[in-house]
Image: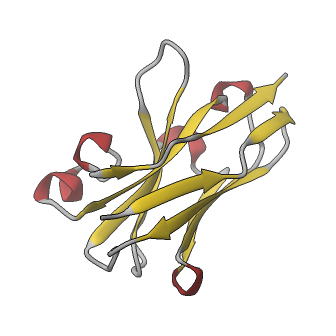
Amino acid sequence: QVQLVESGGGSVQAGGSLSLSCAVSGAVNSNYYMGWFRQAPGKEREGVAMLRYGGTFTDYTHSVKDRFYISEDNAKNMMYLYMSNLKPEDSAMYYCAAGPVTAKLVRNPLDGTDYKYWGQGTQVTVSS
């Protein structure tokens, strides 16, 4: 069983920065993908960024490339999302997720439907 706990959300003005953290417990290894997803009210869940745990593969949705950076610290069992140049459209509940690598995830690593484990979320609000 894998448990994920997010922290670090908050309110910031447009152009500002925030860092999100995800504390990971359980049997996550290099055969897992981990990612950050977000969902704004009235909108579908969106994959923001992901990485292969213990590896170098990462992927980002187009709208956050060059603004967001995903990373992990295996020694601390943590995953992070550094967000810079934030925009009002980045406002959403952000979720940490993890799942064993599947053929479907290899094809579309930002597809949340194949991620098995989810955190409770942390709110990010960006004001203009």
Q: Is residue 49 visible?
A: yes
| Quadrant of the snapshot with the C terminus | top right
| Quadrant of the snapshot with the N terminus | bottom left
Q: Position of residue 49 (x, y in %)?
A: 48, 52
Which quadrant of the view contains residue 89? top right
Q: Position of residue 51 (x, y in %)?
A: 42, 65
Task: Tell me if 88 is positioned left or right of 41 in this view.
Answer: right
Q: Nearer the viewer, residue 40 or 59?
A: 40
Q: Which residue is most to the top?
A: 42
Q: Is residue 59 visible?
A: no
Instruction: Give the answer, above or below, for where 85 lies relative to 7.
Output: above
Q: Which residue is most to the left?
A: 103
Q: Residue at position x 29%, y 50% from top?
A: 115
Q: Position of residue 78 (x, y in %)?
A: 56, 71
Q: Nearer the viewer, residue 25 or 68?
A: 25
Task: Tell me if 58 is positioned left or right of 121 in this view.
Answer: left
Instruction: Give the answer, above or below, for where 121 lies relative to 56.
Output: above
Q: Position of residue 22 (x, y in %)?
A: 57, 60
Q: Residue at position x 78%, y 39% from top?
A: 10
Task: Tell me if 126 is positioned left or right of 98 in this view.
Answer: right
Please give the count of numbered marks on the rendered protein. 0
Instruction: Give the answer, above or below, for where 59 lies relative to 39.
Output: below
Task: Tell me if 80 is positioned left or right of 114 in this view.
Answer: right
Q: Residue at position x 77%, y 30% from top?
A: 126
